[in-house]
Image (cartoon, helix red, strand yellow):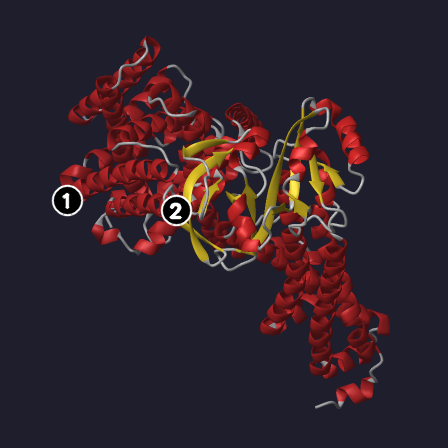
Amino acid sequence: MSESTEKLADNWQTVEVDEELSEAPDASPASSSRRYLIWLQSLAFLLGLGLLVYVINRVGVQPLFDALLRIGFGFFLIVGLSGLRHVLRTIAMRAAVPAEHRRLTFRQAFAARLGGEAISFLTFTGPLLGEATKVALLRKRVPLTYGVPALVVDNLLYNLSVVFFILSGAVVMLVTYPLAPQVNMVLLIIAGVAALGILIAAIAAKRRVMLLTWIVDRLAQLRLSPKVILKKRHHIYHLESKVYDFYKHHPAAFFAMVACNLLAHAASVFEVYLALKMLGFETGVAQSYIIESLTKVINAVFAFVPGTIGVYEGGTEVILQKGLGFTPAAGLALALVRKAAIVSWTSIGLLVLTWRTLPNAYRRILDRSPRLQRLMDSLVLSNIAHRPARTAVSVLGTGVGVLLIVFTVGLSRGVLHERGRRESNIGAEIMIRASGTIGLGASEFRLPAAHAAELATIPGVRAATPVGQTLDRSDSGFGQRLIDGVNFDEYANIARVTIREGRKLESGDEAIVDPEWKERRRAKVGDTVELFARPFRIVGVYEPPGGGRIKIPLSTMQEQEGAANRASMILVACDDPAKQEDVAAAILERFPNDQLVLTRELPELYASGVPALNVFIKVVVGVAAAISMLVILLAMYTTVTERTRQIGILKSLGMSKSSIAWVIEQEAIIVSVLGVAVGIGLTMLARLAVERTTSLTIEIEPRWVLIALGVGLLGGSIGALYPALRAARQDAVEALSYE
């Protein structure tokens, strides 16, 4: 290594020492600056969060949810494309390091990039702290003398490609689309600033303008430059010289980096194109190119906002709506999907940082806290860590018990609540069922269909129509689905149903479906759906949704059930919905044997549950508690047997019976808490799988999560009680002689 290189390395180390000294407790100006930045960052984050809430509220949650639902497992493709950008940028960053000093693998460079980008994404200082993080992660493999210039070159080339990308995108939009004068003006300003930036960069490169050195000199003339910067003026000049000489000494690496940056931008354009396609919007490559180029403007201008929260979502929505004519939900959904992919890789970056920094931080914390050191050396945690396989099995067993409770209750409540909401959204105010009908599920065909004409003659009744309801096996093979049989014209008159696609029901093996069912199964008019073990042709899509998602002709259902001229219920619509109680009283007076339900009360009735189902839930809770208790009992009993000699040693050293029993109980409680956490995680995964593959709804209620926590802790504590007492009662002499 040359003498000048050694001096530069020494000086970079001196800079780090100076930075560490500046962070000392007595450096009050630095501490004040850090507090100011933290407050500023918090304010920017809160303002961005408020903007995001405002945008979502303005667009509406339901349109946004409907759009995001179309993505499904395609989200993993978006995450993959986002990761491809990181791969290409990693190749470029690694190429910037001279080959003779490139003592790092691609995996190490990739980990360093993810860690640095996570800091850039989450902090107020953005790229400054992010690049410093990359330097810190790479310094053991790349000397600072070469690592810092490499990162500077990498960022300069990438930022120049971003400026060119923004310029070209603005030009494409100006040429392609007829725009409002205000939009034209904004695009011209963006294009002008980008072109000016490229021109300045070209002039600086040609004349080898040392911009940072020039700024330091000007500040020194004005006596505004800090002394620490003046001392490093020579090294800043040397760094800029190495950057300008990069192309001269490494032309192949230079063009490889340019190619990687261009491919990274192409991957971003394809990501936008694919996401919009998955969301169900028609788009082209030119539109995707424009969207990506203009969103880079947002990222550049608002880089100081942590995660660009709010501004990125709101800006993307404005670009798509005002500039390209998309719906507001399209822009917001696109932004949220891409942001979720970024957050996924940011999470991996944080794991990298944790993996690299946690061991040192762990040792420092233990050195500074003797009490924590004693805790980590405690019997409880050491016992848990001593048998990891058994601990994992115990945690999983408790988790299965929690899964039984939360998932079963969530499934039953979700199905009932969803059924109640849909049944109450059928346009009728009153539901008539046959006398003696039990429960709220699909009932038998016991009501004469002609009874609807009699009900229609009662004063205050606007219309009445018979409806058949039955359950059929779900096409996924999991659970059952509700099917309505209707006379379409009569039903549409009451429920205000219209056909959005296709045509209405007529007769035979025909079916109409609601939009959500169609979207979930990627179906279209003309397809077939298997009902009652035979194909039914989908002839239309109706809205608004209500009742069963699939409707067939009432005559077809009557033939299927062998119940000619009969129905499950009759729906009654009132002339004045506000007087439905009076109409209901008139119906009961004329037909006292009818069973009458006001549809507005259906959600509450379904929410209260079914008596048999409530009994079933109690049985499930009891089984889950028994599982947790038996798993912990077996694990703790085996533990006590294996540690007989250890218990004897503890008793011989004077440890009391209650202390020994409490150690066993503490271990059981910790395992139970971990089991509850695992059980809730398994429940979330099961919920995602079931809702993606079926039409079932699962509602995770906080109340039942707390009940599951209580059951897990109680079952674990009771299960460990006998082993704890057995350990406490052991004779010290016998325990010491145990083999």
Which class describes the residues within 10 Å of circle 1: few (<14), some (14-19), or many (20+)?
few
Q: Residue 427 has which mark?
A: none
Specify the quadrant of the image occupied by residue 151: top left
Near-viewer residue (40 or 624)? 624
Position above or below: 735 against 696: below
Q: Position of residue 198 (x, y in %)?
A: 22, 23
- The amino acid type of the residue labelled 1 equals Ala
- The amino acid type of the residue labelled 2 equals Gly
Q: SS of the residue at dot 1?
A: helix
Q: Position of residue 405 (x, y in %)?
A: 68, 58
Q: Residue at x 66, y 47 (%)?
A: 416
321 relative to 46 in the view: left or right: left
Specify the quadrant of the image occupied by residue 82: top left
Q: Residue 252 has which mark?
A: 1
Q: Residue at x 60, y 47 (%)?
A: 469
410 relative to 594 in the view: left or right: left
Mark 1 vs mark 2: which is more N-terminal? 2
The quarter of the image holding the C terminus is: bottom right
Position above or below: 14 against 166: below
Q: Position of residue 596 (x, y in %)?
A: 75, 39
Q: Position of residue 399 (x, y in %)?
A: 64, 62
Position above or below: 184 against 702: above
Marker count (numbered): 2
271 relative to 70 in the view: left or right: left
Q: CA distance from mark 1 to mark 2?
A: 37 Å
Near-viewer residue (399 or 615)? 615
Which class describes the residues within 10 Å of circle 2: few (<14), some (14-19), or many (20+)?
some
Tag nearer the camera, 1 or 2: 2
Residue that badge 2 annotates: 74
Task: Residue 336: tell me if it is visible.
Answer: yes
Task: Residue 16: tell me if it is visible.
Answer: no
Q: SS of the residue at dot 2?
A: helix
